[in-house]
Image: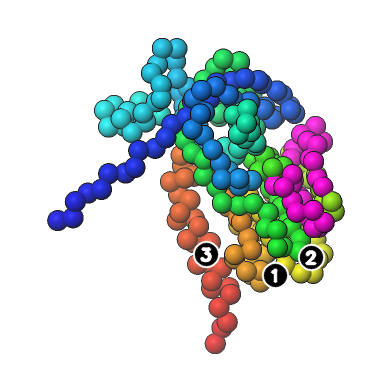
Amino acid sequence: MAERQERPKRTVHTGRVEAVEQLTPHMVRIVFGGDGLSEFATGGHTDSYVKLLFPPPAPGDPEPLDPDRIRAERPREEWPVTRTYTVRSWDPVSRRLTIDFVHHGGTGLAGVWAAGAEPGDRLCLLGPGGGYSPAPDADWHLLAGDESALPAIAAAVEQLPAGRTAHVFVEVSGAEEEQKLDAPGDVRVHWLHRGDRPVGSVLVPAVRALDLPGGTVHAFVHGEAGFVRELRRLLRVEYALPKERLSISGYWRLGRDEDGWQASKAEWNRSVEAEEEADLTPSG
C-alpha cells in the first residue's frame, strides 16, 4: 500500500492594516504592512490573488495562524472561511500589500470587514497564486470584467507594453464607481454603466461590438461566471482565438457565495469546455 504523502504546510501571512481609503461608494482600499508579511512575495503577475482567512485573529491569538491544525483539531464550524481577492499592488521595498474590496452594504463577509477596518487591525492570508500578465509579444490586448475584476484589470493596464493597443471594458453600476486608470500608450478605456440591469448585460454587447484589430491578441476576461461564459464562447468559438492567448475565469457566480461557487466551479468549467469542444469540432 502506497504511503500517504503529507500536504506541504502552507505559509500563512498576517497583514496589519496601515491605511483605509474609500475609493468609490462601493470600493474600499486596504493597505497592509507589518512583520507578518516578511515572507510574502508575488511572481509579478498582474492577477496575483490571495486567500483571506476569516474571522480575523483576535487580540492575543498566536501568530502565525495554523489553519491545517485548526481543521485537524476543531469541528468544521470553527474552521476558518476563505475569500479570494486580487492583489492590487505589492511593494517589495516597503513591504506593503494593497487590496481593493467591493462592498455592498451589510451583506457578504470580506467587504463588510473592509468597510469597518481600522489601522492596527490584522488579517491572515494564504498565497499568492496567479498566472496572467499582459504578454509583451501580443499586437493588442483585450481586458474585460466587472467590479470584481477591476483591481486585476487596473494592475494589468499599468503594465501594458508601451506602444501596444489595448481595449479595456469595465462594467460598473454607475459613473460614481469609475476609477482613474493609469493607462499608457494607445489604451482605450470603456466604462459601462449597467444601472439596475443584470451584471454583464452591458459588457457582453460592448465587447461583441468591438471591431477586432488585426494581429495577435492577448485577452483577459474575468468576473461573474454567466457573462464570462458568454464572452468565452465569443472569443473561442465565434472568433476562433487560440486558448493559450486567453485568460478567462469566473471569479464569482450570481446566487452563490464563494464556498458554493468554488465547490461547483470545476464541474461548471468542464461543462463549458465540453460545449466549446463540441462547437469547435467539425460535423460530419
Viewer-nearest residue: 112 or 99: 99
Identified by mark 2, the residue type is Leu
Q: Along the horizontal axis of the image, is 219 left or right of 66?
A: right
State which quadrant residue 21 falls in. Answer: top right
Query: Mark 3: few, some, or many residues within 10 Å (few <14, many ≥20)?
Result: some
Read off the residue under disc 1. Answer: 239
Residue 58: mark = none
Q: Residue at x 27, y 32 (%)?
A: 72
Q: Quadrant of the N terminus?
A: bottom left
Identified by mark 3, the residue type is Glu
Depicted 92 relative to depicted 213: above or below: above
Query: Mark 1: few, some, or many residues within 10 Å (few <14, many ≥20)?
Result: few
Q: Say which element carries label 1.
A: loop
Identified by mark 1, the residue type is Tyr
CA–CA distance in space, label 1 to label 2: 9 Å
Residue 79 visible in the picture = no
Can you give x and y, in whole percent of width and height, for residue 250 in the image?
Answer: 57, 50
Can you give x and y, in whole percent of width and height, for residue 132 in the image?
Answer: 61, 52
Read off the residue under disc 2. Answer: 212
Q: Which of pointers 1 and 2 lies earlier in the amino acid sequence?
A: 2
Q: Residue at x 59, y 64 (%)?
A: 244
Viewer-nearest residue: 201 or 156: 156
Q: Which of pointers 3 and 1 lies earlier in the amino acid sequence?
A: 1
Can you give x and y, in whole percent of width and height, for residue 9 in the image?
Answer: 35, 38
Q: Quadrant of the C terminus?
A: bottom right
CA–CA distance in space, label 3 to label 1: 16 Å
Q: Residue at x 47, y 45 (%)?
A: 262
Closer to the observer: label 3 or label 2? 2
Read off the residue under disc 3. Answer: 273
Point out the stretch of residues depicted in magenta. Answer: 156-184
Depicted 18 relative to depicted 173: above or below: above
Marks 1,2: beta carbons within 8 A = yes
